[in-house]
Image (cartoon, rainbow, N blue to C red):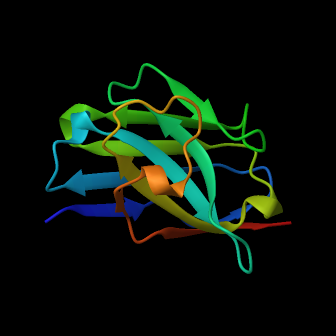
């Protein structure tokens, strides 16, 4: 059974930083491209970032470029999202997701992902 568990969310002031983690089990982690999505209240879930199976390529939504960094540690079956210079509009539930495509080839939409975590809340106060 595949499980993906996010952690690291919380409440932070504008301009602050958080590091999200997503630990996966029940799958061969380094066979999967991994992504982060977010969903704010009353909004659609949107792609934030994606990295290839080996972490050599990464893609970002325009609204996080230069502020967020995706990375992974395949030895630990863990995906990360370092979030700096946070803004109130970054407030959302953040989800990690796994795609058996292996590579991102851009920023794939939700349908490209096979497994999802339960999400972690990020709240940025102004």
Q: Outermost residue, bottom direction?
A: 42
Residue 94, percent from left and from top: 55, 62
Image quadrant in which the C terminus is located: bottom right
> Viewer-proximal residue, 79 or 116?
116
The quadrant where residue 55 appears = top left
- The residue depicted at 45 percent of the width and 49 percent of the height is 112
Q: Outermost residue, right direction?
A: 126
- The residue depicted at 36 percent of the width and 49 percent of the height is 98
Position of residue 94 relative to residue 121, above or below, is above
Q: Outermost residue, top direction?
A: 56
Decide if residue 115 is on the left or right side of residue 13: left
The quadrant where residue 89 appears = bottom right
> Viewer-proximal residue, 80 or 118?
118
Image quadrant in which the N terminus is located: bottom left
The quadrant where residue 28 appears = top left
Decide if residue 59 is on the left or right side of residue 87: left
Q: Count how many numbered circles sit on residues in the image.
A: 0
Q: Outermost residue, front direction?
A: 111
Residue 107, percent from left and from top: 59, 39
- The residue depicted at 41 percent of the width and 62 percent of the height is 7
Residue 82, percent from left and from top: 56, 42
Position of residue 104 relative to residue 45, above or below, is above
Position of residue 103 relative to residue 83, above or below, is above
Residue 11, percent from left and from top: 64, 69
Decide if residue 36 is on the left or right side of residue 24: right
């Amino acid at each position: 059974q595949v499980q993906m568990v996010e952690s690291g969310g919380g409440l932070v002031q504008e301009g602050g930083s958080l590091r999200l983690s997503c630990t996966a089990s029940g799958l061969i982690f380094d066979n999967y491209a991994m992504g982060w999505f977010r969903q704010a209240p009353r909004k659609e879930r949107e792609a934030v970032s994606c990295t290839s199976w080996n972490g050599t390529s990464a893609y970002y939504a325009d609204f996080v470029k230069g502020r967020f960094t995706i990375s992974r540690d395949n030895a630990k079956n863990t995906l990360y999202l370092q979030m700096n210079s946070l803004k109130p509009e970054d407030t959302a539930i953040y989800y990690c997701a796994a795609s058996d495509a292996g590579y991102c080839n851009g920023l794939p939409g939700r349908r490209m992902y096979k497994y999802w975590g339960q999400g972690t809340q990020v709240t940025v106060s102004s």
